[in-house]
Amino acid sequence: MKYTMDFAEMTIPLYMASKIPVIAQCTVTNSLQHGGLLVEDLAVYLGRNKNLVFPHRHNFYHFILFTSGSGSHSIDFEQFEIEPWQMYFMSPGQIHTWAFDKDIAGFVINFDRDFFKTFLLRPEYVNNFSFFSGLVKDEVFVVVEQEREALLHILARLLAHVDDLDFARISLLYLFHVLEKQRRLPDVGENNLYNHTLLRNFMDLIETNYRRLRLPKEYAALLYITPNHLNALAKEFLGFSAGELIRDRIVLEAKRLLVIHDYSVSDIAYELNFNDNSYFTKFFKKATGLTPDEFRKTMVIKHK
């Protein structure tokens, strides 16, 4: 038996923002979080939230480690089959759904956006970890064998001392560093760090401005580099052109809005700053191979 539900059966209380279902942490924790943090056995968490399987967003950071079990989950419309030692991270705002079997085991951690605000001089430092990039390709991975024992030790201690918030913050940061170490490319010096910083700033600018800035040259100007330099960096480190990254962010937001049925195609075109429905439809179909209405229908079928 799986934790599943038809898309139409959205019955639990939701916090609504721009017609997108956003789940607040208080909805999923049953008052168990401590100062904006929840650390819990995954089977217990799923048992309490067994109806939370329709597409939704969170207003908090969320990550899960699977130590056993099967099933699938999706983040921003990319689906993954569960395997032991898989871990996924989600930033606030990403769309998520799951279909887990009942033999699932592992850990879940949720923490609020401001969890590190008074603890770090630069709270945004957390966003420097690759798995909080907002790019799905960085957020789902299998923990390498040599890091598993250390990871379990950290999570077990967090579970036992979740009410000690300073200990929890230090432990979480250490856990992030352990995981980042296995994913980071070999250091090639200051120039590499500079380039990664530029790309991170580019991605942050896209996130803030994708509704109104569509051209790589506009972002290059904000970064004080040439469009050719920006494009070369994006291709070298991410495998996509700068224009593709901008386009993909617009398409992702369009997909997110399309899964909400009372948001018309006209509403979405206006929300994303397109001049008219026809231009938006052509843009979306060129990127996905489907019209907005066709994409919406495929999502309804998928969640029945």
Image: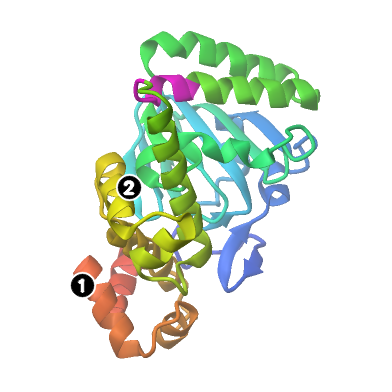
Q: Is residue 274 visible?
A: yes
Q: Which mark is residue 41?
A: none
Q: Magenta span covers which residues? A: 179-186
**Number of numbered callouts drawn:** 2
Residue 189: give x, y in percent of width and height. 39, 24
* Quadrant of the drawing holding the C terminus: bottom left
Q: Tell which of 180 and 6 is nearer to you.
A: 180
Q: Nearer the viewer, residue 117 or 220?
A: 220
Quadrant of the drawing holding the N terminus: top left
Q: Is residue 243 left or right of residue 126?
A: left
Local secondary structure at mark 1:
helix
The residue under the point 39% across, 89% down is 275
Q: Quadrant of residue 250?
A: bottom left
Dot 1, crowdedness within 10 Å: few (<14), some or many (≥20)? Answer: few
* Majority secondary structure in the magenta region: helix
Dot 2 or dot 1, earlier in sequence: 2
User: Which residue is painted at 68% across and 39% down in the image?
Assistant: 123
Give the vertical position of 126 relative to 260 (above or below): above
Amino acid type, mark 2: Gln
Residue 234: % across, % down: 31, 48
Q: Which residue is mark 2?
A: 79
Q: Residue at x 74, y 35 (%)?
A: 121
Say whether residue 194 is left or right of residue 282: right
Does residue 1 appear in this view?
no
Marks 2 and 1, how far apart in space? 22 Å
Residue, disc 1: 286
Residue 86 falls in which quadrant of the image? Answer: top left
Q: Residue at 43% of width from left, 28% of height from top?
A: 190
